[in-house]
Amino acid sequence: MRPNDPALHVEMGTLLLALGHKKVGLQWLENAVTLKPDFAPAHAALAEYYRSQGETEKAAEHERQARDR
């Protein structure tokens, strides 16, 4: 078991978001960044989420972090 693996947190977060569980899915993605702040896949997933919600500034920030990692 790897409870502190940020990749698993991103996978769970994206699955939950796809199922319509926005709050919990977002928490999983944020946890991935907490576990590993430079984890590009987590920032990419957060950018996609924020873009889908119309939060362009947050999306741009996570896109930048994903790209710079």
Image: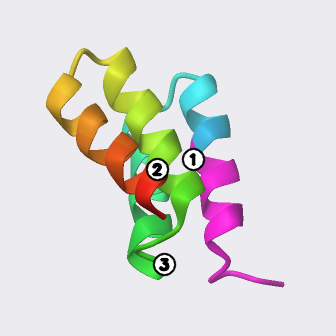
At a point 25% along the width and 45% down the height, the residue shown is 61
At a point 61% along the width and 62% down the height, the residue shown is 9
- Graded by Cα atoms within 10 Å as few (under 14), some (14 to 19) or many (20 or more), the crowding at tag 2 reads few
Q: CA distance from mark 3 to mark 2?
A: 15 Å
Q: Quadrant of the N terminus?
A: bottom right
- Amino acid, disc 1: Gly
- Amino acid, disc 2: Arg
- Specify the quadrant of the image occupied by residue 54: top left
Q: Is residue 59 left or right of residue 26?
A: left
Q: CA distance from mark 3 to mark 1?
A: 15 Å
Picture disc at residue 36:
3
* Residue at image mark 1: 13
Which segment did they paint magenta? 1-13
Q: CA distance from mark 1 to mark 2?
A: 20 Å
- Graded by Cα atoms within 10 Å as few (under 14), some (14 to 19) or many (20 or more), the crowding at tag 3 reads some
Judged from the image, the secondary structure of the residue bearing numbered disc 1 is helix
Judged from the image, the secondary structure of the residue bearing numbered disc 2 is helix
Estimate the x, y position of residue 15 in percent, counting from the top left: 67, 37
- Specify the quadrant of the image occupied by residue 26: top left
Q: Is residue 19 left or right of residue 66?
A: right
- Amino acid, disc 3: Lys
* Residue at image mark 2: 67
Q: Main secondary structure of the magenta part?
A: helix
- Residue 7 included in the magenta stretch of the image: yes
- Of discs 1 and 2, which sits in the foreground? 2
Q: Is residue 53 left or right of residue 17?
A: left
User: Which label's residue is closer to the chain start, 3 or 1?
Assistant: 1
Please say if 5 is above or below 11. Answer: below
